[in-house]
Image: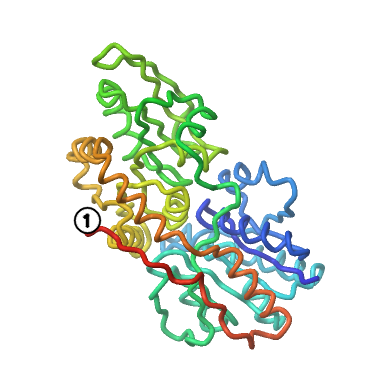
């Protein structure tokens, strides 16, 4: 039985795939400890996973602003102390990092202690952690066709983003029933990512009543700290009641995504992977302040693959019109759904777990396992 340390805290986009991978490894009889941050999003997301072992690892994000830079170095020094203790106590065979500030200390300590290190990058522009540490890692998992300087091709695997097992597509009728929605009315879901997006929340509030007139239910996940749960009841143009509202956080992501006809969303890699898994067509609004503008690159690739559309935040004045044009176009929604099925063929958690088992037992000498068998997928030209 192998032991794995998985550094995955700081954002839902890092923690969610860490949970997915840990559950897969646990199902195979391995021991796993997930290293998380002390941020609210981490503590909220782990509440339902009583079967998993978590440890808080000190750390904060990098910044050139003097006060934040000082905090970064102090927190990382504290993280090193905790990391050395964990490695000594748990004796992991592999240390796995999903990027972000929580993986810096533990991967550095792993390298010093000659523990194999594996890294995962979900975005199409790799983050600082992967760029700086990747050259020393035994294995680096990257999105399709993404390359990073100084990382040997023999150490790279293109296995994608692990999605939690509970996030599966079910019928719209069943999903809407679980969430208390009207099964006969359209549903628009608005997602700002685990940190929330004020621009999307404000847009949702401005159009909610107008969309209700056309019998479109709107459910906006605001993000922790950016709003409270609110439910409103409107009347459509034909006199039918329409319920819409805001929720700060959802524990029923699979149900929520399965219930919707369309999403308006930020373009984080995790959100895109979960929407793809649930076959949900999307209009992506990249965060213009994301590091290295990686969300725009994520959205461009998603649009090229035929899963939805990219709208830059500066053009959100036209978003209401575009949403109406897409959500009532059944032929277009059907084609987008077909494209999404073509995009969702590989079980990344399974593939990565297979590879990690080889890495832990043979020091990374294994050949890469091929993804799922190719199938014929004709995507529409959008």
Q: Going by the picture, which residue comes out furthest to the front? A: 376
Residue 17 placed where, x, y %?
A: 56, 58
In this view, the residue in front, 205 or 237, is: 237
Q: Is residue 218 above or below residue 252?
A: above
In this view, the residue in front, 195 or 209, is: 209
Q: Which quadrant would the C terminus be assigned to in this image?
A: bottom left
Residue 202 placed where, x, y %?
A: 31, 33
Answer yes or no: is residue 105 visible: no
Where disc 1 sits, the SS reads: loop
Residues packed near mark 1 inside 10 Å, few (<14), some (14 to 19) or many (20 plus): few
Q: Which residue is mark 1?
A: 382
Residue 24 horizontal side relative to residue 101, left or right: right
Residue 1 placed where, x, y %?
A: 81, 70
Q: Going by the picture, which residue comes out furthest to the top? A: 239
**Picture residue at 64% right of the left edge, 88% below the top:** 365
Residue 308 placed where, x, y %?
A: 30, 51
Q: Residue 226: which quarter of the image?
A: top left
Q: Residue 5: which quarter of the image?
A: bottom right
**Picture residue at 43% right of the left edge, 23% below the top:** 182
**Picture residue at 48% right of the left edge, 28% below the top:** 228
In this view, the residue in front, 216 or 58, is: 216
Residue 332 horizontal side relative to residue 119, left or right: left
Q: Is residue 120 above or below residue 235?
A: below
**Picture residue at 71% right of the left edge, 85% below the top:** 362
Number of residue marks: 1
Q: What scheme was used to colour the molecule?
A: rainbow
Residue 181 horizontal side relative to residue 264, left or right: right
Answer yes or no: is residue 281 visible: yes
Residue 316 horizontal side relative to residue 374, left or right: left
């Amino acid at each position: 039985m192998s032991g794995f340390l998985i550094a995955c805290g700081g954002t839902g986009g890092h923690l969610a795939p860490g949970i997915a991978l840990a559950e897969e490894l646990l199902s195979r009889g391995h021991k796993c400890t997930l290293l998380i941050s002390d941020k609210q999003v981490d503590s909220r997301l782990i509440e339902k996973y009583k079967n998993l072992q978590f440890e808080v690892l000190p750390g904060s994000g990098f910044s050139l602003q003097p006060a934040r830079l000082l905090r970064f170095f102090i927190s990382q020094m504290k993280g090193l102390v905790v990391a050395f203790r964990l490695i000594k106590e748990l004796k992991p065979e592999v240390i796995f990092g999903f990027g972000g500030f929580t993986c810096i200390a533990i991967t550095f300590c792993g390298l010093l202690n000659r523990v194999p290190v594996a890294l995962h990058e979900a975005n199409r522009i790799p983050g600082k952690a992967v760029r700086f540490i990747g050259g020393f890692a035994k294995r680096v998992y990257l999105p399709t066709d993404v390359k990073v300087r100084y990382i040997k091709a023999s150490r790279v695997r293109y296995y994608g983003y692990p999605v939690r097992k509970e996030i599966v597509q079910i019928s719209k009728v069943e999903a809407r029933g679980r969430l208390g929605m009207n099964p006969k009315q359209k549903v628009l879901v608005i997602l700002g990512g685990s940190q929330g997006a004020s621009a999307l929340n404000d847009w949702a509030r401005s159009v909610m009543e107008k969309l209700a007139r056309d019998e479109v239910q709107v459910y906006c996940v605001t993000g922790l700290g950016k709003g409270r749960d609110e439910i409103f009841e409107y009347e459509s143009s034909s006199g039918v009641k329409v319920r819409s509202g805001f929720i700060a956080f959802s524990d029923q992501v699979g149900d929520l995504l399965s219930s919707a006809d369309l999403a308006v969303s930020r373009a984080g890699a995790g959100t895109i992977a979960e929407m793809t898994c649930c076959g949900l067509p999307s209009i992506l609004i990249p965060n213009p302040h994301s590091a290295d503008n990686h969300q725009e690159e994520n959205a461009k690739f998603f649009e090229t693959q035929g899963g939805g559309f990219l709208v830059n935040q500066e053009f959100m004045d036209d978003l209401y019109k575009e949403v109406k044009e897409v959500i009532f176009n059944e032929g277009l929604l059907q084609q987008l759904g077909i494209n999404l099925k073509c995009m969702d063929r590989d079980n990344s958690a399974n593939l990565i777990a297979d590879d990690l088992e080889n890495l832990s037992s043979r020091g990374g000498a294994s050949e890469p396992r091929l993804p799922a068998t190719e199938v014929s997928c004709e995507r529409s030209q959008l």
